Image: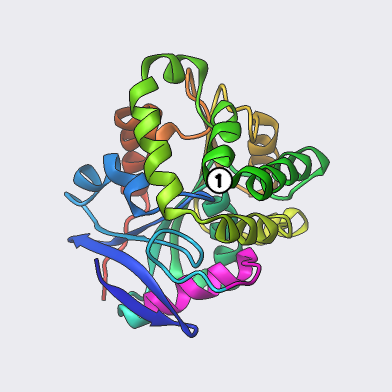
Amino acid sequence: MPRLSVNSINLNYELEGNGSVVVFINGLTMDVNGWYFQVQEFSKRHRVLRYDCRGQGKSDKPDMEYPQIMHAEDLKNLMDKLDIEKAHLVGLSNGGMIAQHFALNFPHKVGALVLVDTCSYIDTLLASIIAIWIKGTQLGGSEFRYDITIPFIFSEDFIKKNKEALVEMKKMSSEINPPNAIINLANGCLKHNTNDRLSEIKAPTLIIVGEEDILIPMKYSKLLNDGIKGSRLVIMKGSGHVPSIEKPEEFNRIVLNFLREYNFIET
């Protein structure tokens, strides 16, 4: 996988397909492989950019907190280096937080915005959950952190039907997520707050939430929907926090149909 020097660090990325660009922005401990079920379908109509944020996957992991505005600046510079003037953004969870900051700070570079199971600010409840994850990582390392997050991430039905796959995912996640990087990502996440600026987001916006999301429940998506003028809210039944993995065919159809309405021609 190629890497580019951005803001004094190296970011791992994958770019494939043709057409207007769609950038997939990872959740907190994802890497580019977390969008496996999207690549084939989206690359039929778009250039698909997946990348690991700093602290993730095969990108550099400097020992510092990574606030969302820093991630947004990293993405802006990555796009500039790849000669991408404008892109649709699809951000999951922490990636959706990054996408909000990107849309606010670099609006000219955004086509349409898709915010998936995310929120506009970290309130007391979310901060408490993140604090537990940080403490769990400090005490038990990456594998223990994975174990305590699973009930928050996936729906009960998905967990029942995918026990073997989750064991493999645990192995891969632990390999790419050293404890210090998880803690730095999580501490950066705690700083997120766009709640008072949502009305400034002008990009056409689709908000997707899993009906059974325990980590960032539906009320947070409704706040985004209320704050971003003209945005649409889609509730995916039977899905937890990661509908792109739990129900990829439905997720792909919903997002591709939305992007088709707001496509643009690359110059």
- Lateral position of residue 134 relative to residue 243, left or right: right
Q: In which quarter of the image is residue 220?
A: top right
Image coordinates of residue 243 in percent, x first then y, are: 43, 32
Quadrant location, the C terminus: bottom left
Asked if the stretch drawn in magenta spans residue 178, the answer is: no
Quadrant location, the N terminus: bottom left
Residue drawn at x 66%, y 56% is: 189
Image coordinates of residue 73 in percent, x first then y, are: 54, 75
Residue 194 in sight in this render: yes
User: Considering only vertical position in the picture, is 240 above or below 47?
Assistant: above
In the depicted view, which residue is nearer to us: 47 or 188?
188
Image coordinates of residue 47 in percent, x first then y, are: 24, 60
Q: Quadrant of residue 136?
A: top right
Give the residue pinned by disc 1: 93
In the depicted view, which residue is nearer to us: 185 or 248?
185
Binning the other alpha carbons within 10 Å of mark 1 as few (below 14), some (14 to 19) or many (20 upward) gives many
- Magenta span: 63-80
In the depicted view, which residue is nearer to us: 256 or 29?
29
Asked if the stretch drawn in magenta spans residue 73, the answer is: yes
Residue drawn at x 31%, y 74% is: 3
